[in-house]
Amino acid sequence: MLPDNYLIFLQIILFMFITPGAPRVLIMSQSLNYGFGRSLWTAFGDVSANTLQGILVLLGFGALIKMFPNIVIYFKWAGIFYLFYIAYGYVKIKSKIDINTNLKIKSNTSLYIDGFLIAFFGPKAVIFFVTIFPTFLKPDGNYLIQFFILMSSYVVLDFLTLAIYSGIAKTISDKLKTNLRTLNYISASALILIAIVIAIKV
């Protein structure tokens, strides 16, 4: 039995996922610099963070944030500073002709952590899981089954759209891979732009 308003839930998250945000820009940057396959570690980090956020809401963390809404602000600025940190890392990477050499600069674990931290501290995700996600969990139904269906749908669609964004970036990188300096500056500029937008609008 699907949760009430399940199709509405799918529409909401699909709109969130197709809209370029910090996780999408990040995975495109990782794909440009490290390749499609390795960028998926960033996607794994992203969905892991979202799953943890969902579990925390289920355990009552959402109520705590509603009592102390300033927590969201701290999350927001932690995410902004981390975006700047990643952008700075791209600027430091030296231009190389052999793209395979550049692929070794970050480990898969580092790519996973990047995805996890950006998603976990992302204000859009925090607000979604605190304010919108719980409204689809009805008290007259089985909470765990509802949670599993909603969370599984969220994770699968999130991962697939991240992979699509990464694939688009990979197409670009195939044309620009002889100029890694350009790729690095594109990545850094995009991440800084997203950080500024989050700081101003969110």
Image (spheres, rainbow, N blue to C red):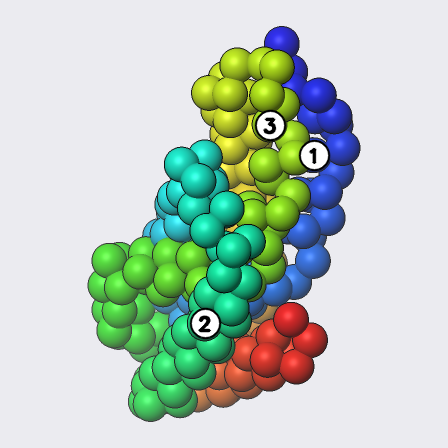
Q: CA distance from mark 3 to mark 1?
A: 11 Å
Would you identify the image quadrant in which residue 51 lies?
top left
Image x and y of residue 25, in percent: 55, 67
Asked whether disc 3 touches disc 1, contact meaning CB atoms under 8 Å apart, the reply is no
Image x and y of residue 188, in percent: 48, 83
Badge 1, how many Cα within 10 Å: few under 14, some, many 20+? Answer: some
Would you identify the image quadrant in which residue 141 lies?
top right
The residue type indicated by label 2 comes to Tyr
Which residue is pictured at 59% across the width and 80% down the height?
A: 199
Q: CA distance from mark 3 to mark 2?
A: 27 Å
Task: Label 3: state its secondary structure.
Answer: loop
Would you identify the image quadrant in which residue 171 lies?
bottom right
Between disc 2 and disc 1, the foreground one is 2
Task: Give above or below for 93 relative to 148.
Answer: below
Q: Earlier in the sequence, mark 3 or mark 2?
A: 2
Between disc 3 and disc 1, the foreground one is 3
State the residue position of label 1: 9
Left or right of 143? Residue 196 is: right
Q: CA distance from mark 2 to mark 1?
A: 27 Å
Task: Give above or below for 158 relative to 179.
Answer: above
Which residue is pictured at 31% across the width and 60% down the height?
A: 113
State the residue position of label 3: 137
The image quadrant where one finds the N terminus is: top right
